[in-house]
Image: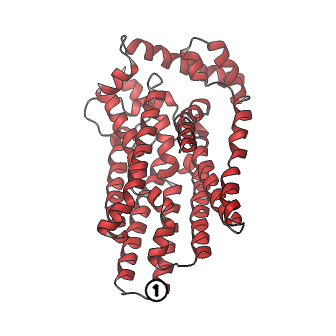
Amino acid sequence: MAGRLLDGVGIGFGVMIAPVYIAEISPAASRGSFTSFPEIFINLGILLGYISNYVFSGLPDHINWRVMLAVGIVPSVSIVFVLLVIPESPRWLVVQGRAGEARAVLLKVTDCEEEADERLAEIEAAAAAATGSVSGETVWRELTRPSPMIRRMLVTGLGIQCFQQITGIDALVYYSPTIFRDAGVTTESQLLLATVAVGFFKTVFIALAIVLIDRVGRKPLLYVSTVGLTVCLVLLAATLWLLAHGAVPKALGVAVAVVAVCGDVAFFSVGIGPVCWVTSSEIFPLRLRSQAAALGAAVNRVTSGTVAMSFLSVSRALSVAGAFSVFAAISALSVVFVHKLVPETKGKTLEEIELLFGDGEGESLGEVELGDAEHLVRRKG
């Protein structure tokens, strides 16, 4: 339990800091792909964990679980060496009044000196505006008593973090052996292989999302993801109910259940899984970004923990099929949320994205995103 607590603290720092850091150091054209990296490597780690568990399960019982835990030391130690070479965020350096160091970092991550100077000028302008707009109020006071613009950002950022988890993905991953057993898979080796298949699909489709996110945009991927999740959850719930009532052949039911589970993790991974972290790290203004993104990560983890800890109790009360029917209904709501409240941010700088939320005169986000950032700047000033 002590090890789990320390591990949770480390993971907590990672999920809060990594997306924000990557978003702040990346050029706009590839920011979506780069900010998706934490999600793919988390899931690559999960997949490797599944595979190592399967490989080491053949060792004697008093050794296998020790080896399964011990192999986690290797990636943990590697992080220490990585931290020795990565630079500080240029936006953070500007806020701290260290523009010279920020320029040196930008020269490393841009194609030419002109581009570095242009990005530095944008960051300095945003930092100057942020300093003048808070009027001495603390960041947390601004987050707890938000203006209409910040409120829209918070609804989008915290909402997408909540929907990412409340649709049941962690319950599906954590309890996939329980789900497969309920569907009729019985042997330990079959359960482990089915779990490896879940991890494989989750990782492969996140890699696909990284390729697509800066080409097709965030919102199309979110539409495909949330609609696909809803369909797969409905299919899984219906299949488990039919199996429980003997209404379909067992072999067919098992096959459909496995396909539905793998389809669910695939649709999650190609859209809301990585896009959630990209969006949350993009939409907030510089002065609030770190704290607001951290708040979003906290919402994500609390929601994940609540779903994971309540899944077995809900399954006992409603059946596993009933639990996934609830997840399917919530997933359908996430489609509406994406349509109404999530703007497209592809190709825009972090400073331009603020303008998507800045209209206080009644326009919907859908209308705002149809105009480009320059048009909004002209209208406002």
The C terminus: image quadrant: top left
| Left-right relation of 102 to 349 | right
Q: Which residue is labeled 1 in the image?
A: 250
Mark 1, secondary structure of its residue: helix
Can residue 217 be seen? no
Colour mode of the rendering: secondary structure
Q: Is residue 203 above or below residue 159?
A: below
Residue 56 position within the rendered picture, expressed as x and y whole percent measured from the top left: 70, 63
Disc 1 residue type (three-letter): Lys
| Left-right relation of 21 to 300 | right
Can residue 129 be seen? yes
The one nearer the camera, 98 or 1, is 1
Residue at image location 52% in from the left, 31% down from the top: 349
Q: Is residue 193 above or below residue 133?
A: below
The one nearer the camera, 322 or 317, is 317
Residue 242 position within the rendered picture, expressed as x and y whole percent measured from the top left: 36, 81
Residue at image location 44% in from the left, 59% down from the top: 171
The one nearer the camera, 322 or 152, is 322
Res 312 quadrant in image = bottom left
Residue at image location 42% in from the left, 34% down from the top: 295
The image shows a total of numbered marks equal to 1
Res 155 quadrant in image = top left
Residue 22 position within the rendered picture, expressed as x and y whole percent measured from the top left: 59, 35
| Left-right relation of 145 to 306 | left
Residue at the far front: name it: 62
Residue 293 position within the rendered picture, expressed as x and y whole percent measured from the top left: 46, 34
Q: Is residue 103 above or below residue 169?
A: above
Mark 1 surroundings: few (<14), some (14-19) or many (≥20) residues within 10 A: some
